[in-house]
Image (tube, helix red, strand yellow):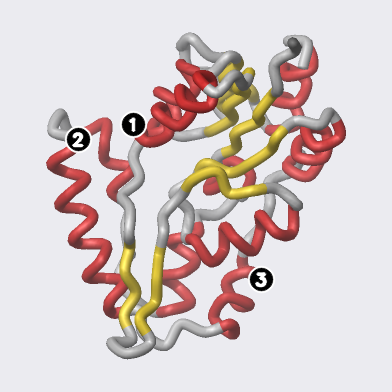
Amino acid sequence: MKKQTCVVLDFDHTLSSNNTWNIAREVMDVDDPVHFYRSYKATEDLDGRAEIAKEWAMHNFGEMTGFSQEHLAEMYELMELNPGALGLVEYSKSQGYRTGLLSAAFPPLLEQFAQELGIEILQGFEISYDEITKEFEMKKSFSDKDKRDYVIDLKNQGYRVIMIGDGENDIPALEHADLGIKVFSQEPGSYLNATDLSHALELLQQAGY
């Protein structure tokens, strides 16, 4: 029986040219909500740092009151997809591959783009908004290990996994995928490097997908 294929995509700085958290900070006029996933490579105590960062993020979300559809619309207008993003997604879908986002991007924006692109959110931050306290709550931390474990879980389910990302926090997932492609990169590793998303699509096709 032929294995199903799942194309796993990062969002911030991979499909998009922006960082959704920076866009949220700009529009909401609040302190930077969370960038802890970018600091993992600078610390050995990953679990401890994630827990501290989670508490910090929850505090900042508590300050982000009054979030509205108008805010979301303004954020959306500031976002840009990288060249080649649509072509990559459409190719994956045309092949019948399960296609989804594995990203720590700002959830409302991630949901908006997932809907627009017609793909799913495989995993990301879970945020709820309490109408009584008027506070946001982050329900789940998200790390490079979360991404890696999700890719491993997909493989255990019988999927051939293609992982495409750009950041240091994507590397463990890239290394465990059947085909890992790091975009905007020329770093050595057990994954392929692509200059952009169009090049990533070429590499994917050359690998027989």
Rendered location of residue 59, percent (x, y): 22, 70
- Residue at numbered disc 1: 145
Mark 3 or 2: in front is 2
- Distance between the alpha carbons at the discs numbered 1 and 3: 32 Å
In depth, the one of 172 and 149 nearer the eye is 149
Horizontally, is 147 left or right of 182 in the view?
Answer: left
Q: Amino acid at mark 3?
A: Glu
Tell me, yes or no, whether the two marked residues, 2 and 1, touch with CB atoms within 8 Å: yes
Q: Amino acid at mark 2?
A: Leu
Mark 1 or 3: in front is 1
Q: Earlier in the sequence, mark 3 or mark 2?
A: 2
Horizontally, is 84 left or right of 110 in the view?
Answer: right
- Residue at numbered disc 3: 77
Tell me, yes or no, whether the two marked residues, 3 and 2, touch with CB atoms within 8 Å: no
Who's the residue at 62% across and 21% down the image? 159
Element marked by disc 1: helix
- Residue at numbered disc 2: 46
Element marked by disc 2: helix
- Residue 52 drawn above or below residue 30: above
Where, by quadrant of the figure, is residue 167 drawn?
top left
In depth, the one of 15 and 146 nearer the eye is 146
Rendered location of residue 105, percent (x, y): 48, 53
Who's the residue at 81% across and 31% down the image? 96
- Distance between the alpha carbons at the discs numbered 2 and 1: 9 Å
Rendered location of residue 157, percent (x, y): 55, 23
Rendered location of residue 60, percent (x, y): 27, 70
- Distance between the alpha carbons at the discs numbered 3 and 2: 35 Å
- Residue 136 drawn above or below residue 36: below
Who's the residue at 33% across and 44% down the image? 37
